[in-house]
Amino acid sequence: MNTDSVAQSQEPQIKLGSPMAIVDGVSFSGGDFWTNYGGNQSIQTERLFYPRTLEDLKVIVREARDNNKKVRCVGSGHSWSATAMTPDYMVSVNGLDNIHSPVQSRDGSGWTVTLETGVLVSQLDKYLRDHSPPLALPSNVVPDVVRFGGMLTMGCHGASLNARTLSDTITEMTIVNARGELVTYSEARDPEAFNVACLNLGLLGIIYTATIKVEPMNIRLRVTDSYPTLESLFLGPQAGPALKARILKNDSTEFLYWPFQHFMKPEQNKNIWVKEWERTSEPAEDLKKYEGLPPMVDNPFFSMLQTGSRVMEIPDALHFPIGDGVTTVEDAGCAFKVDGDFKNACEAIAELVKLNWTFTTSKPECAGTAIEFRFIKASDKILSPAYDKDPEAIYCMINVMATSATPGFKEYSCRIVANWISKYHAKPHWPKMWESVDNVIPYLRREYGDRLTRFNLVRKTQDPSDMFVNDTWRPLFQENEL
Ligand SMILES: Cc1cc2nc3c(=O)[nH]c(=O)nc-3n(C[C@H](O)[C@H](O)[C@H](O)COP(=O)(O)OP(=O)(O)OC[C@H]3O[C@@H](n4cnc5c(N)ncnc54)[C@H](O)[C@@H]3O)c2cc1C
């Protein structure tokens, strides 16, 4: 169950409270009961706003200021932490979905596109593919149903070693702050504030637009899926260097492991799914010929995976479906810096397979678990869990996951994250489950240290009354002001 690709169709659920009302042209409903994609977070909100324009965002901020309310935005609701939630005013950004014409830099070296933050990944993919010349984001998250506001705010990432996080692709951002002013952030205007804006956790205000770098789609990706043994990849003295060589050879690499060899049978899985992407000038294949192939894996959740190699257009290669379209999952994930010889990555993976086996076989209801990991280059965004001064540093983005409502998963995943923290100084990926990990706040304050103080200085200039600080972020940013 790769959460980064499973069950992509599920949307967060909203049980409407009172009928729609309008304030200065902005629709909202009252008393809605909102639940995220994973089903592990829900809240009753006083108002859920549906803005469509910049002016609407200013009205919402004014309403919040006049009524002394907190504000949090929500996109597709695919985060597992409670970051999007407040009992006061939630703002669905889905109606802010305009995309401006891409622009080529004067020296012809690169392209950027400006989009509103409710734009879906699938929407931008199509827009860029239809553009002349066709353009693409060279690396991206696996699902195409999430929105740019959510991804950029949280520092989301793909699987490419030629890329960092999506926040690292931003060249400009506009955000409506707590005073209702639209502020433009760019490296040229103010490098420190721009760095903060690129991965801002929704704490500078309501992001209106983001301008991101895109590339001409003049290459394709060869995607090769294989199912080798765990032992051949992660055990033995040469495992680390061999893994490193494999990762460096590819544009992108993703690993996916589920614990049982066969569905509903007790044997432990000795094999791991590996997806490797390489850049190629070969033409893309007609993917229709691969439709309807018999399943290779007798687990309904992973049955659409097929080993083999095929050449695809970039967006088709980056987003792939897994899952039965019904089951949702929960996920705890972290970033940790990989050693020069990848030894710590091999050790972490081998240990996680063991711990996961103990959990997954502890009760029949715990059987639906999985492990997923990828590698990316470091980010220079000060609140990125993959932050590093060395731009060549490689980070392992590792996840443990289970079918939603698996009993004991929250506690189990907290222990796993705590273990990664103590062994590898891992830092939680903000949209995943991390808030219940023991002592996580003092740890994060220590680890992020001065960067947290720098972030807070910028934040306070935009939101002096903490309008955008909810219970997820209050312990980190507001309690005992840094
Ligand atoms: C099946 C699945 C697969 C996933 N795969 C990946 C993956 O491959 N890589 C990865 O890195 N992550 C992955 N994730 C995590 C996911 O990308 C993040 O949770 C992302 O934030 C989801 O976007 P969203 O539109 O659902 O945002 P939401 O969860 O709705 O919001 C996320 C945060 O962004 C804030 N926000 C949104 N818009 C704005 C705005 N306009 N202004 C201010 N704040 C805003 C919200 O307040 C909230 O704090 C996956 C999640 C799922 C469920």
Image: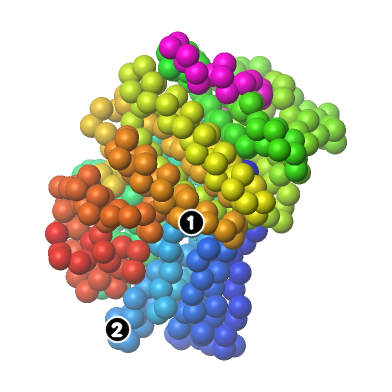
Q: What residue is drawn where x is 72% and y is 21%?
A: 308
The magenta segment: 215-239
**Vertical side of 136 occupied by 446: above or below:** below
Residue 224 left/right relative to 400 = right
Up/down of 94 relative to 397, above or below: below
Using the image as rendered, state which of residue 113 and residue 141 is in the foreground: 141
Q: Point out the image quarter for the N terminus.
A: top right
Q: Is residue 123 visible?
A: no
- Count numbered badges in the picture: 2
Q: Is residue 397 visible?
A: yes
Q: Quadrant of the C terminus?
A: bottom left
| Residue 144, position as x, y percentages in the image | 60, 47
Side of 84 where 201 appears, left or right: left
Pinpoint residue 115: horizontal percent, then vertical percent: 47, 52
Residue type beneath disc 1: Lys
Look at 52% across and 26% down and name the residue there.
252
Which label belongs to residue 68?
2
Which of 186 and 66 lies nearest the eye of the viewer?
Answer: 66
Circle 1 packing at 10 Å, graded few (<14), some (14-19), many (20+), is many
Label 1 element class: helix
The mark that comes first in sequence, 2 or 1, is 2
Label 2, label 1: how many angstroms apart (C-alpha)? 33 Å
- Circle 1 is placed at which residue position? 410
Residue farthest to the front? 362
Up/down of 56 relative to 336, above or below: below
Q: Residue at 62% of width from left, 21% of height from top?
A: 229
Tag 2: amino acid: Asn
Q: Nearer the viewer, mark 2 or mark 1?
A: 1
In magenta segment, residue 228:
yes
Task: Indicate the secondary structure of the residue bearing disc 2.
Answer: loop
